[in-house]
Image (spheres, rainbow, N blue to C red):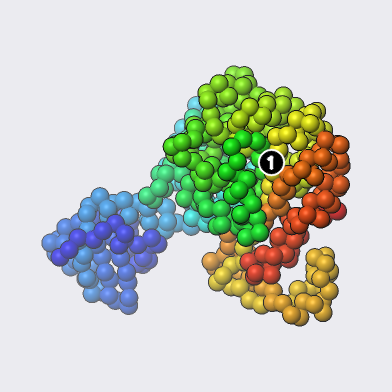
Amino acid sequence: MSQLSFQDYPREPVVVENLSVKFMKQGKFIPLSLNGTALKIAMADPRDVYLVDALKTAFGFDVEVCWGKEEDIIESLERVYGTGTQTLEMIIEEAGKDVYDISRGGDEDVDHLRDLASEAPIIRLVNRLILNAVEIRASDIHFEPFENEFKVRYRIDGILHDVESPPRRLQAAIISRVKIMAKLDIAERRLPQDGRIKLKIGDKEIDFRISTIPTLFGESLVMRILDRDTLILDLEKLGFPQHILPQYMELISQPYGMILVTGPTGSGKTSTLYTTLAKINSSENKIITLEEPVEYQLRGINQIQVNPKIGLSFAKGLRSIVRQDPDIILVGEIRDKETAEIAIQSALTGHLLFSTLHTNDAPGAVTRLLDMGVENFLLSSTLLGVLAQRLVRVICANCKKEVIPEKRLLRSMGMEPDEALNHTFYEGTGCELCRGTGFRGRTAIFEYLGVDDDIRREIVQNATTERIKDMAIGKGMITLRQDGWGKVMEGTTTIQEVLRVTLEK
């Protein structure tokens, strides 16, 4: 009889009526499958005929025995039956039995709160909320206190979704449990706090970035899930269209100058920059990054985390970085005139510098820097190119179907309904795989502004965003909405998605 590997154990519980988890633990066995009366189990001791006879007699099963490692069986029982057999509702009910509302309590409640947060039901509940979020590929978990409820929401593919929320009386214990995991001060509920957690889930380690902030009805807490397996270090897989990719590859191979990636929070700027650095990383280049915070660790790259509390700002860190003899520098964000000026000086003195800005489009980055007080002649000398981007949800391949878009949607994209008859459009109807949303995963849409001599002259003349944009379009620049339209025509996303994330004046 060959021994089972850990991959052979069930991911979901095999439900056998009246068969208790306690009995399974005592007998060191776990059900693998149940077909009618045929029960297949993994046992640590396959020679235990008494256990097999007990199952046959008590349940009337035909039992097939497989041999498994004791530690694998125990771990599988904990993973599948420790939390998995219970619905979130059952775990919440169990957790709420002995917990009272101390969310408005004072310091005298801290010891009791620490005890509650360390109770098994609260630990199980928080673990299940985290595990569920990871399983459905959520990027964030939001714990939000309101006057009469305590909400838990997951951000999936950029959109927040409500999940089964615990009663409000569990709020303080749940928040405290996460704060304990992140080594934060549970007694401090009046000031914002930030922390990190590293958890092993399945066979991979996942980082969580924790942020708390006091609100009117208690602490609001957000967990950002940083799963390195979801980081795509491939420009084409990120969604780079063929009309931009060659230009971008040429851009990032320049020896010095400044390259900017723009877009709002959550538009995928960090992923694009990390992928870019991974592409140009080699033993010949020294790459240093200055980030707030460092989201993913990249092999062979020196990463520094900004810490304003001790005076390590972007500007101060950047001054120190240039003395480290780097070839390539990434500054997480240009927020002020001081950082912008040091970044430009770094680009002028022989460094290739990458950074981000929060602007609506690529041409807007130029005027944003000029508005900060950057000298126009210095900017025109250093800026090589600007990449603007957004993330759109991808239609679920499992429930994708042809549709005829509404006339108003077509017109908003500059197409008459009659023209649409020659094209095929798709939407997702919603299925179990995409949790009824019709979307699964995201891809990026881009707008690339290459800075040539004509654009440089416009920068020197302090041209408006509209003037630079018109000139760039005249030279063939594809706008964000036009690139999104290309993704619609490919059947990757929907018109509604493109309209949701783009702004056309």
Q: Secondary structure at mark 1?
A: strand
Q: Quadrant of residue 238?
A: bottom right
Left or right of 187 in this view: 412: right
**Is residue 348 visible in this depiction of the protein?**
yes
Residue name at image x 72 percent, y 64 percent: 485
The relative height of residue 325 versus residue 23 in the rendered view (above or below) is above
Q: Percent position (x, y) of residue 146? A: 69, 42
The single residue placed furthest to the top in the displayed view is 310
In-front residue for pair 28/359: 359
What count of labels does the image hold?
A: 1
Residue name at image x 30 percent, y 62 percent: 8
Left or right of 437 in this view: 378: right
The relative height of residue 156 versus residue 384 in the rendered view (above or below) is below
Q: Percent position (x, y) of residue 262? A: 70, 44
In-front residue for pair 317/105: 317
Q: Percent position (x, y) of residue 16? A: 35, 67
The single residue placed furthest to the front in the displayed view is 453
In-front residue for pair 470/21: 470
Q: Quadrant of residue 205?
A: top left
Q: Which residue is mark 1?
A: 384
**Is residue 109 visible in this depiction of the protein?**
no
Residue name at image x 69 percent, y 30 percent: 344
Left or right of 33 in this view: 387: right
- Name the amino acid type tagged 1: Leu
In-front residue for pair 292/31: 292
- Please rate how many residues cluster around mark 1, counting C-alpha atoms within 10 Å: few if below 14, some from 14 to 19, many from 20: many
Q: Percent position (x, y) of residue 58? A: 25, 69
Residue name at image x 38 percent, y 60 percent: 11
For the N terminus, the image quarter is: bottom left
